[in-house]
Amino acid sequence: MIDLLTSTEAWAALLTLTALEIVLGIDNVIFLSVIVSRIPKRQAKRARQIGLALALLFRILLLSLLVWLIGLTEPVFIVTNVALSWRDIILIGGGLFLIAKATHEIHGEVEARDGEVEARPRPGAFALVIVQIIIIDMVFSLDSIITAIGMAQDLEIMVAAVIIACVIMYVSSGPVAKFVAEHPTTKMLALAFLVLIGVALVADGFKFHIPRGYIYFAIAFSAAVELFNVLARRNRKKVS
C-alpha cells in the first residue's frame, strides 16, 4: 500500500482511471436525471441518493468478484458467427432497455397536450423508479468495471477511482436533474442521448465497437447548443 502512495505510475493510473470512470458515469447521471423527473421532488432526491449509492455498491461488489467477472467475458454461444459472452448479453439487454425506456418517455412527451396538467404520481411509482435504476446501474457498473480492469492492475487503485467518480457523480446529479426539470427541452435532448447510449451498448454487445469519444463529443456539442438556447430564451424574457 505504501509503495502505491509513493509510485508516480500508481498516481497516474489513478488519475487516468478516475477521469475515465467520471466520463462513463455521465450515462448514469443522465439516466437518473430523466427517470426521477416524473416523481415528486422529495422522492426524486431520495431516488437519486439510492441510485448513486447502488452504483457505488455494485461497482465495489463487482471489483471484489474479479475472477467471476473476468469469466463473464468467455463466449457462451454463437449467433450469426458472433461469439456472445454473458457480458455481451447483459450489454445488449441493458441497451435495449435504455432504448425502450427512452422511446417510451419521448412518446409521452410528444403526445402530451399543451397545458395538460401532469397527472399525480401513481402509487408504487417510486418503487418502479428504483427498480429501473437498479437495472441500469448493474449494466453501467459492469461496463465501467470491466474497463477499469483493463486499465489498472491494483485493486486499491480501482476502488479509489470508483469511489472518487461516484462522489463526483453524486455532487453533479442534483444540479443536472434540477436543470432538466426546469427546462423541458433539455429533457428531450437527454432522452435522445439515452437512445444513442443504448444503441452503443447493443453494438458493443454484438462486437461492433463505437468509439465512446464520438458519442461523448456529440453529447457535449448538443448540450452546448441547448445551453445557448436556454440562455437566449432567458435573455428574451428579460427584455420583454
Image (cartoon, helix red, strand yellow):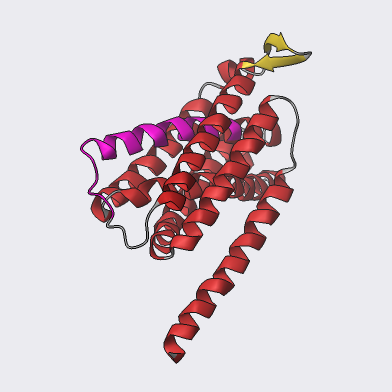
Total tally of numbered discs in the picture = 0
> In the rendered view, would you say 171 is above or below 163?
below
> In the rendered view, would you say 174 is above or below 98?
below
At x 29%, y 47%, the residue is: 46
At x 43%, y 65%, the residue is: 183
> Observer-nearest residue: 76 or 128?
128
| Residue 140 is one of the magenta-drawn residues | yes
Does the magenta stretch mainly form a helix, a strand or a loop?
Answer: helix
Q: Is 33 positioned to the left or the right of 5 in the image?
A: left
At x 26%, y 48%, the residue is: 43
At x 57%, y 49%, the residue is: 192
Indicate the position of residue 95 as horizontal and vertical percent values.
57, 32
Q: Is 190 positioned to the left or the right of 112 in the image?
A: right
> Observer-nearest residue: 193 or 45?
193
Indicate the position of residue 171 as horizontal and vertical percent values.
43, 57
| Residue 33 seen in render | no
| Residue 125 is one of the magenta-drawn residues | yes
The magenta segment: 118-143
> Observer-nearest residue: 73 or 203?
203
Q: Is 125 positioned to the left or the right of 176 in the image?
A: left
